[in-house]
Image: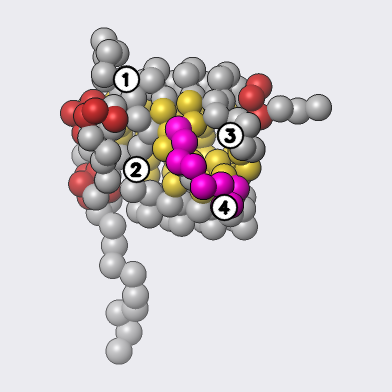
Amino acid sequence: MFSFAHLVLLHLDHCPRLIHVLPLSDSLDTLPHMDTLEIVCCGDLREVFTLDPKQKRQRIIGCPKLRRIHLYELPSLQHICGSRMSAPNLETIKIRDCWSLRSLPAVSRNNEKLPSVDCEKEWWDNLEWDGVEANHHPSLYEHSHSSYYKAQQQRGTVLR
C-alpha cells in the first residue's frame, strides 16, 4: 500500500481540471522524504496538499528533505499546503505565473546559504509573511527577478 510519507518526487504536468493534489490525513505531520515539488500548467489547481476542512488545530507540515520547488502557470494556486509548511533545507524556488499564491514555506535561519527564489517581482512584492520568529520572512530568502519576466497583465477586453 502506498503511503504519502514515502513520497520523494511530486511532478505534475498539464492536469487542467485538477483542484487538489494530495489529501493529508490527521496523523501525517511530515513528508519526510519529499525532495522535489514540480507542478506545471494545471490551471484549476488551488492547493497541492489539502487538509480535512473539519480539522480545527493549526499545524505545521514538515518537509525536512525538500530542496526544490518549481511551480509554473498555476493561476488558481492559493496554497502549497492548507496549513503552514516548513522546509528547513530548501535550496531553490522557481515560480512563474502563480499570481494567487501568497506564501512560501518557512525555512531555517541556520542555513549557510539562503534558499534562492526566482520569480516575478510583482508576485514577490505581494507575498504575506509570518515573521522572523516563525522562520518566515523575506530576509531569509535570496530572491531574484529575471530580466525577461513579464508583469501581470490586466485581464479583460480591449473591445468597446
Can you name the residue that lies furthest to the front here? 56
Image position, residue 53 (x, y; %): 57, 52
Q: Nearer the viewer, mark 4 or mark 3?
A: 4
Residue at position x 24%, y 50% from top?
126
How many other residues sit within 10 Å of disc 1, few (<14), some (14-19) or many (≥20)? Answer: some
Amino acid at pointer 1: Ser
Q: Nearer the viewer, residue 57 or 152?
A: 57
Name the residue beneath numbered marker 3.
11
Residue for badge 2: 103
Q: Amino acid at mark 3?
A: His
Q: How would you rate the neighbour count of disc 4 (Cα within 10 Å): few for under 14, some for 14-19, many for 20 or more? A: few
The stretch of residues the image draws in magenta is: 52-60
Tell which circle, 4 or 2, labels the residue nearer the N-terminal end: 4
Which tag is nearer the camera, tag 1 or tag 3?
1
Q: Which residue is mark 4?
A: 53
Q: Quadrant of residue 50?
A: top right
Secondary structure found at label 3: strand
Image quadrant holding the N terminus, namely top right
| Mark nearer the N terminus (4 vs 3) | 3
Mark before the other along the chain sequence, 1 or 3: 3
| Residue at 24% in and 28% down | 133
User: Looking at the picture, how far across and down is residue 154, in whole percent?
Assistant: 28, 67
Residue depicted at 46% across the width and 56% down the height: 76
Question: Quick one: label 3, few (<14), some, or many (20+) residues within 10 Å?
Answer: few
Q: Amino acid at mark 4?
A: Pro
Contact? badges 1 and 3 (CB < 8 Å): no
| Residue 108, label in figure | 1
Look at the image and tell me whether residue 40 can be seen: no
Q: Nearer the viewer, mark 4 or mark 1?
A: 4
Q: Earlier in the sequence, mark 1 or mark 2?
A: 2
Say whether residue 77 is left or right of residue 111.
right
